[in-house]
Amino acid sequence: MNEKVSLKGRSLLRLDDLSDAEIFHLLDLAAEFKRQKHAGIRGNSLRRKNIALIFEKSSTRTRCSFTVAAQDEGGQAEYLGTHDIHFGKKESIADTARVLGRMFDGIAFRGFKQDTVEALARYSGIPVWNGLTDDWHPTQILADLMTIREHFGVLKGLKVVYIGDGRNNVANTLMVGCARAGMHFVDCTPAELSPPADLCRETAKVAAAHGGSVTVSTDPHEAVKGANVLYTDVWVSMGEEDKFAERVALLRPYQINMDLMRRTGNLENGKAIFLHCLPAFHDYKTELTHEIGPLEVTDDVFEAPFSKVFDEAENRVHTIKAVMVASLA
Ligand code: CP
Ligand code: NVA
């Protein structure tokens, strides 16, 4: 590991826990892990390490990435759904954290409150990694930056436009990540779903210091001009299911479709890609959407060659492996 960068013993609760050098170190380490995995090489840098996965919300990619990454490097992961353990019910979060801290080497947490993941880190005494809270999704954005860099070779100077629910965990964290990487980030969302003003102010300052920018727009046609990345997420995040009808009505004009992709002006020259953290409502077959069609992205965009969503999903495992190894090895 680079001498200036040491994440040993540290948690990742939000992207701002990392310095610029640490973010880029993790991206480099993840790229090396990807190269090794594709070459059939398995490591042992998590040998004898036990990882607890405490999940309050559902997950495919994040849960599997922590499990596979641990196993690839000789470690063990134990899934603890919060319905299976006493977490916050018969036992306080602080007590569960202290117990797990005596047994495990690291904890991945997915859930509702950011305070919960912070409490886990405070009381367990071992590294804790945020696998999504209502506020932040740091491991997702590391995979997104990795995917963008893989495609374009650089991050600095690229234009990323996030379109949809502009104040959710993914939008907030992407804003931070793009600012730190010196990119031009636009959060395109209706006024009702604007990101927090203080976050916009802070990230705009950070972006400017890195040669980039952060702006908010309500106009998708204007926002996407010159974009290299169009990014969206579900319109209704976990825990907000009662807002489904209201969100669909509000966000219909913010759907990413071929017309919007073409309006980047970068589709024909191969300088525009589509990203989505997944899961995505892109077709008519999904149970929830069978009567109302695709939501945040159309099927032709989702399935197009410029859609890099499965590279992005794969990169979850490489970046999460980098985070765990940097914290524990
Ligand atoms: N992108 C993401 O976090 O996916 P999961 O909800 O499947 O973990
Ligand atoms: N914003 C979404 C992300 C899912 C990976 C949610 O919180 O449900």
Image: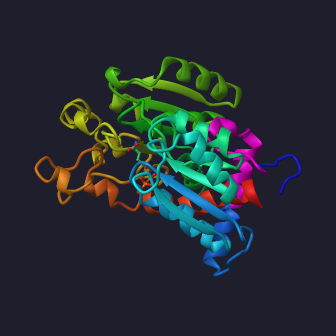
Residue 72 in percent (x, y) is at 63, 73
Is 197 situated left or right of 38 in this image?
Answer: left
Residue 197 in percent (x, y) is at 50, 18
- Using the image as rendered, state which of residue 173 and residue 325 is in the foreground: 325
- Using the image as rendered, state which of residue 149 and residue 77 is in the foreground: 77
What coloring was used for the rendering? rainbow
Question: What residue sits 33% from the left and 52% below the top?
Answer: 280
Q: Residue furthest right?
A: 3
Is 62 situated left or right of 15 in this image?
Answer: left
- Using the image as rendered, state which of residue 248 and residue 169 is in the foreground: 169
Residue 115 in percent (x, y) is at 54, 33
Question: What residue sits 54% from the left and 41% below the top?
Answer: 93
Q: Is residue 314 visible?
A: no
Quarter-of-image position of residue 305: bottom left
Q: Residue furthest bottom?
A: 40
Q: Is residue 87 visible?
A: yes
Q: Residue furthest front?
A: 90
Q: Which residues are magenta?
A: 8-29
Magenta stretch: includes residue 176: no
Question: What residue sits 55% from the left and 46% below the top?
Answer: 141
Q: How many numbered tags mark residues here?
A: 0
Image quadrant holding the N terminus, namely bottom right
Question: What residue sits 47% from the left and 41% below the top?
Answer: 88
Image quadrant holding the C terminus, namely bottom right
In the rendered image of this protein, does residue 289 appear above or below residue 112?
Answer: below
- Using the image as rendered, state which of residue 193 and residue 153 is in the foreground: 193
Residue 19 in percent (x, y) is at 74, 38
